[in-house]
Image (cartoon, grey):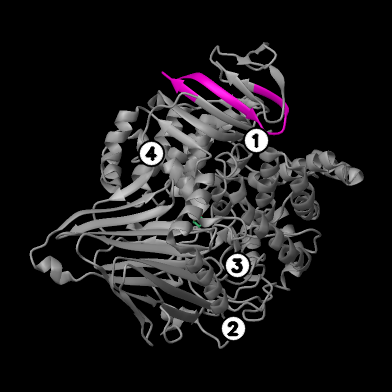
Amino acid sequence: MRKLNYSEQTEWKLWYDRPASRWEEALPVGNGRIGGMVFGGIHRERIALNEDTLWSGFPRDPQNYDVLRHLGPARELIFAGKYKEAEKLIDAKMLGRRTESYQPLGDLWLEQGDSATEADGNELRGFRRELDLATGIATTTYRIGGAEYRREVFISAVDQVMVLRITALGSEPVNMAASLDSLLRHQAFGGPAGTARICMRGQAPSHIADNYRGDHPQSVLYEDGLGLTFEAQLLALPEGGGTVQADASGRLTVSGAKAVTLLLAAATDYAGYDQAPGSGGIDPAERCQAALDAAAALGYEQLRQRHEADHRRLFGRVELRLGRAEEAAERAARPTDERLEAYRRGESDLGLESLYFHYGRYLLMASSRTGTEAAHLQGIWNPHVQPPWNCGYTTNINTQMNYWHAEVAGLADCHEPLFELIRDLSVTGARTARIHYGARGWVAHHNVDVWRQSTPSDGEASWAFWPMGGVWLCRHLWEHYEFGLDEQFLQETAYPLMKGAAEFCQDWLVPGPDGRLVTAPSTSPENKFLTPDGGEPCSVSAGSTMDLFLIRELLEHTIRAAEILKVDEAWRQELADTLTRMAEPQIGPDGRLQEWSEPFAEAEPGHRHVSHLVGFYPGNAITVRQTPELAEAVRRTLEERIRNGGGHTGWSCAWLINLYARLGDGDTAHRFVNTLLSRSTYPNLFDDHPPFQIDGNFGGAAGIAEMLLQSHMGGIDLLPALPAAWTRGQVSGLRARGGFTVDMTWEEGRLTSACITSTSGGECTLRGLHGLSVRLPDGRTVQEGERFQTEPGATYLVG
Ligand code: FUC
């Protein structure tokens, strides 16, 4: 395919001409498990560290054995229209305990060079710190006097260590000191005598009793022996002479070296959600030592090559370029924070928009890799002992949004940690289903942590009472199958989990007063209606639209999966029967999609959640082609929400991009891309909810992909929501459902060429061809909307 002649030198980089002055300016690196935020300091460098299993708490039984006896009475109150009373009952009797918090591991501090050099009249020049998304390497360079210093940082997924390479060019040697520190209980010390190693060993709190509102030391509990143990170790490999010394207090000094490679390993004794810390046979110190020894034997060059090859393999799968190369290069020549400022002031910068897309891919690669924990509210990066919302997995939108781009943007393998989370939840959630609701299958609620809490958390019904977490998560299993068509995955992983969630739904649905099956109690995440009698804000009723969409889709996907696998025929029939008996989402008298089963007035008409639109995106129960009236109701719902201030948090705005893309309204989708970047983005391009929350990055990337390619209506829609601002561009490697990969170029707002690769054969239908046609290998041509058979591995050109 013709390339638009961009330069990789500048394109996929975030760069700055000064060190980060706060955490939200630092640059994230990660291998899915270990995370680092690189500040790029000059004489004093900080790399804030994380390890993805370092959480407060330990396994406990969070079941509330009292819930079940209140379920019947709560339903009676709801069906009698006594919503407020039902809500009070739930708040008082049917919730659970606070989930645990993700913890910061600590900081690696480097002191480098001698500030006296500068005082002697040698100015600091040429400072640059950057993050190259294509290689996953953060680099800081600067000159002082005749010396040029360079620090490179990456975290290798292959070798499980952070690698820091410090070099000095010119006459000056590298003189530096390194130390480790943590906000958690810890000790730092030197390695065995004669080694160039320092260590930090510490303990995570047994419980964090409060959310972030500044740090409340009294909410951080340590009970002896109950928290996870963690360890970080740093090893120095100097080159070109130089001496290394590690003292007993944990300070490592290197002097007179030409270059030094620092290797950092980190581990905890987390051995699974159901294993008490320390009981799983994992020794974090041994783990660190083994990783460091293996990495040291490879040496810097090999570590870097192995990391880069692995990183490029994933990152290079997709390329998106918007607008003219010269313009993109010109904009990229500016520091990213200035670029963002200019964009905020209204300057167009299509390169920044594609950078944001690639950053969304980069961040998922760095926070969710095979074998690691799933990405939580902040991916893996967090400096707080009491992080906002515990840095948890909040499953009424945020956890799902983290993975919206995974399939379409070529990172299906990064989706796997979420499947592991779902698998664990199906075990803890089976107890909760039985104990809380007397139901089969498994259930998960809104807050989940590393211990896989499946019960409601503490708090209030409007968010804590949400037994649909597992149902929604299961959509990811099905999507993974639909994109990749991996039948083994469907059989061994997806189907058993979907089946359990579907069984829960069968038992959870009850006949409402009109005999139709509904959920009760039911909430619509975090929004409230005004009670018809007293006009009081209330969150609890029966059969919220979101519940109905989520359950409907799960049952349909489960039936489809059982058909493909040729299993459970009788049960399939049961599910099909349930579907016919379920209540349907309603269009209200004002033409909007109703959020609840009744046309209640909303307490907050500009609410950030648009839960009832879940059937339109990410779901496909409503589509512009198949159900145009409902799609029109979606549009009206959106307009009203937005008119009242909706879309104001990062993720909420990101959702709007996806929804407008599905409406085929590229210009409005683009307006929200613009809003997300201008209003909800930190200097390091992290999403600013506020505060930092990574879902907006991921949802934004998904939205950009959704504007370019859709495959939810049976067939592939090319450029379905191209905004006027993206007149020309090219993209390669986007994935479509049915096992296809799509490359496209376009000019003047029209498709100019496309190449479809079929991974597993199967039928394909293309739309958005603008008069172009598909050439088949046998010479036949296929037009817009015409179905054709593909061969596995074959490519089909559109021109
Ligand atoms: C949900 C959202 C909030 C926030 C939190 C983590 O409760 O309503 O906006 O994203 O999750």
Residue 695 appearing in the image: no
- Crowding near pointer 4: few (<14 within 10 Å), some, many (20+)? few
335 inside magenta stretch: no
Q: Which residue is mark 3?
A: 450
Which secondary structure, mark 3? loop
The residue segment tinted magenta is 745-765
Earlier-in-chain disc, 2 versus 3: 2
Distance from Cα at disc 4 to Cα at disc 2: 49 Å
Pick out the residue farthest to the left: 121
User: Closer to us: mark 4 or mark 2?
Assistant: 4
| Amino acid type shown at disc 3 | Val
Distance from Cα at disc 1 to Cα at disc 2: 45 Å
Which secondary structure, mark 4? loop
Earlier-in-chain disc, 4 versus 3: 4
In the foreground, 347 or 136: 136
In the foreground, 575 or 107: 107
- Crowding near pointer 1: few (<14 within 10 Å), some, many (20+)? some
When the figure is inspected, residue 550 is found, relative to residue 766, above or below; the finding is: below
Residue 100 appearing in the image: yes
| Amino acid type shown at disc 2 | Leu
Q: Which residue is mark 4?
A: 8
User: Closer to us: mark 1 or mark 3?
Assistant: 3
